[in-house]
């Protein structure tokens, strides 16, 4: 912890760090160092992190899962409300298209594809903004709270594959459910109105 000798008094503890080339030897080296430096406590970095931050990491994981679930629910709600509003606004156009012979499934597919194209553009734009400006913006905000610097650790499979698939699935299902309201609009109802 310090590079100078203690100024009188006893040293409280020593820390010895070891970097292994292969993690296969980890348990063997832990036992060996425990015997050599008895009664010292020998832990690996993962064990040390688990002992000191394990509960905090577990809670952060739970909060992350809850935030993802809440975000998906909000995306579904916004998609459903937006699409219902759009279908209501386009009811005249939908009635004309129905009278021209467009099927309900074709009209529903049209609105669902439109929502998914917008979602794709949103995911691409969001990913680009986060990868270019996100770390700098968050770093600036966190530096106001005392952190010297922040570095994002990105799991590519989760960030670029799994979460976009979850978002697309939830938005597509909300769009399909909202597009079911198209059947209520026909030309006879519009002429009568």
Image (tube, rainbow, N blue to C red):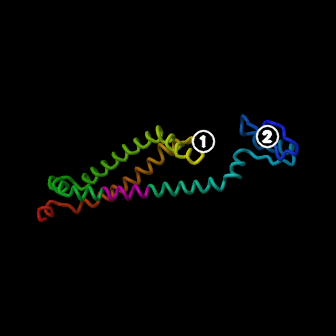
Q: Quadrant of the N terminus?
A: top right
Q: Is the magenta region chiefly helix, strand or loop?
A: helix
Q: Residue placed at 38% from the left, 59% from the top?
A: 77
Q: Residue furthest top?
A: 21
Left or right? Give the position of 146 relative to 166: right
Q: Is residue 1 left or right of residue 11?
A: left
Q: Secondary structure at mark 1?
A: loop
Q: Residue 142: x, y in percent?
A: 55, 46
Q: Residue furthest left?
A: 191
Query: Is 100 in front, or is 62?
Result: 62
- Residue 138 drawn above or below residue 90: above
The residue that mark 2 highlights is 16
Element assignment for label 2: loop
Q: Which residues are magenta?
A: 72-82
Q: Is residue 5 above or below residue 59?
A: above
Query: Is the residue 109 above or below the residue 193 in the image?
Result: above
* C-alpha span from label 2 to label 1: 26 Å
Magenta stretch containing residue 17, yes or no?
Answer: no
Magenta region includes residue 80: yes
Residue 8, image x, y percentages: 88, 43
Question: Label 1, on which residue?
Answer: 148
Q: Residue at x 62, y 55 (%)?
A: 58
Question: How far from the left and from the top, in percent, is residue 35?
Answer: 86, 44
Mark seen at residue 9: none
Closer to the chain start, of discs 2 and 1, is 2
Q: Nearer the viewer, residue 53 or 143?
A: 143
From the viewer's side, name the closer residue of 147 and 48. Answer: 147
């Amino acid at each position: 912890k310090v590079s100078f000798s203690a100024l009188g008094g006893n040293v409280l503890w020593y820390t010895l760090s070891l970097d292994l080339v292969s993690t296969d030897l980890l348990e063997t080296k832990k036992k060996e160092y425990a015997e050599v430096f008895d009664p010292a406590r020998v832990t690996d970095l993962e064990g040390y992190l688990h002992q000191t931050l394990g509960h905090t990491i577990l809670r952060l994981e739970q909060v992350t899962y809850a935030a993802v679930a809440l975000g998906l629910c909000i995306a579904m709600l916004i998609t459903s409300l937006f699409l219902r509003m759009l279908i209501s606004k386009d009811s005249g156009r939908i009635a004309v298209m129905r009278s021209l012979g467009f099927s309900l499934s074709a009209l529903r597919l049209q609105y669902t594809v439109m929502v998914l194209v917008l979602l794709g553009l949103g995911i691409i734009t969001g990913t680009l903004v986060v990868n270019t400006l996100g770390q700098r913006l968050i770093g600036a905000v966190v530096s106001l709270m005392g952190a010297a610097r922040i570095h994002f650790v990105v799991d590519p499979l989760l960030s670029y594959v799994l979460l976009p698939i979850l978002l697309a699935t939830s938005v597509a299902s909300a769009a399909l459910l909202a597009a079911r309201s198209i059947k209520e609009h026909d030309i006879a109802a519009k002429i009568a109105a």
